[in-house]
Image: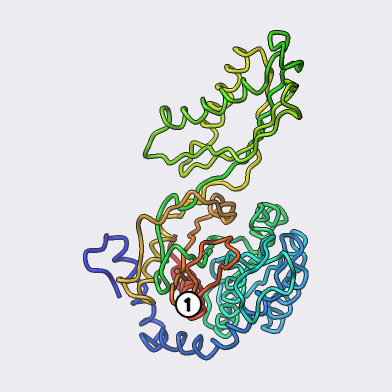
Amino acid sequence: MIKQGACVSGCFYGYHYFIKLMIMGQGVRYVMDIRKEIEKLKEELVGLRRDFHENPELGFQEFRTGETVAGYLEDLGLEVQRNVAKTGVVGLLRGRHPGRTVALRTDMDALPLDEETGLPFSSRNKGVMHACGHDGHLAMMLVAAKVLSKRKEELHGNVKFIFQPNEEDAGAEIMIGEGILENPKVDAAVGMHLWSPLQSGKVGVAKGPLMASSYYFKLLVNGRGGHGGAPHTTISPILSGIDMIKALQEMVLNETDALKPTIISFGKVNAGTYPIIIPERMEIEGSLRCLHRDTHKIQERMREIVDGISKVHRTTCSLQFKCGNDLLYNDEKMTGLAENVAESIVGGENLVTSDISVMLGEDFAEFSKRIPSTFIFLGTANEAKGTDYPHHHPRFDIDEDILPNGVELLVKIAVEYLEDQSD
């Protein structure tokens, strides 16, 4: 199905997808066969999701999860690499015919949170919960691997299934540093996230900036302590720090382009121990998020501002940044492919292609900045089922009826990408 009035590139991919299926001699039946196969696997799909949900593990502690994933992939006959970045797993499906390699990536970790859903398969691990949908991601990826492995003889190229640990705190870079994008070299990557801001049955696909870069910062302001009754003998780090906070907020308002979303937020301030003691130090922590590629320019300006204010107040200061994740930027061609595949599955009326970018971060950005990639949102909000709570909420849950759509998206995007041998 191709949208009327779609752009030239969009029409090309929709038409190309249809023609490729016809060339394979199976046409629409090929599409329907995949869908029927996935429907037959729904009970297994839901069972996997509930098992992962019941047994959540924090980042770099996904030992049971990793073993479950590795065993499943080995049973499918895939080449499996265990203990990547401590607990990650990579499965390689080699197609019969030569061609490119596409990576399908999912996350594995849960959150440090007490579950309040009341589900019969609620977390067994107190203080740990799958409150972001990673349990569903794992299940969809495994079933996609099963469906694709049955088509090994038809595949022109390879599929790498990447199960990443510690997405919530930058596990992707470690996996990539251990060589998961090589041997064979990965040419493109696809990621997906179950998404409660979207209604169940909707699919969000957008080109360009999708999820913001996220840098955590620590600002230390040093002064000279003393008695609160004699402030003239001291240099207050608190007064200096307050001016820095105000100036940084004003910088975002007055100096950054409103069409380049930028957020500086402050989450922690610590100074002093007693009302009549002016302290030696003030500690300020927060985050910088940018939905554009000028993050480092913003950081440089932040340093200029705090250094200038520090000189005025006669304090000293240091500003340090830690990368949570970089900007997730969807490649135009890969996203065009994904958009047309998604439309063929859910229909144009359920495809959302604008106003879905967010200031939240996603570790898939480490893939998108290295190779052509696309990241897709799969709506899971259903008020009647109670699956419309925000991510990281203790009552977060997913609509399991949309999981087959996620599997179908992963399978068909991989097949279409490998079938298209053009540059």
Element type where label 1 sits in the image: helix
Q: Where the N terminus falls, by quadrant?
A: bottom left
Quadrant of the rendered image containing residue 68: bottom right
User: In which quadrant of the rendered image does the C terminus lie?
Assistant: bottom left
Q: Is residue 377 above or below residue 286?
A: below
Say few, some or many: other residues with alpha carbon within 10 Å of mark 1 (under 14 / 14 to 19 / 20 or more): few
Residue at horizontal 62%, vertical 60%?
185
Asked if residue 303 lies left or right of residue 125, the reply is left
Query: Which residue sits furthest top?
Result: 232
Quarter where residue 116 is shown: bottom right
- Tell me where residue 263 appears, x and y as whole percent: 49, 39
* Number of disc labels: 1
Amino acid at pointer 1: Lys
Q: Position of residue 50 (x, y in %)?
A: 63, 79
> Who's the residue at 39% across and 77% down the image?
345
Expressed as whole percent of the image width and height from the top left, the position of residue 325 reads 59, 48
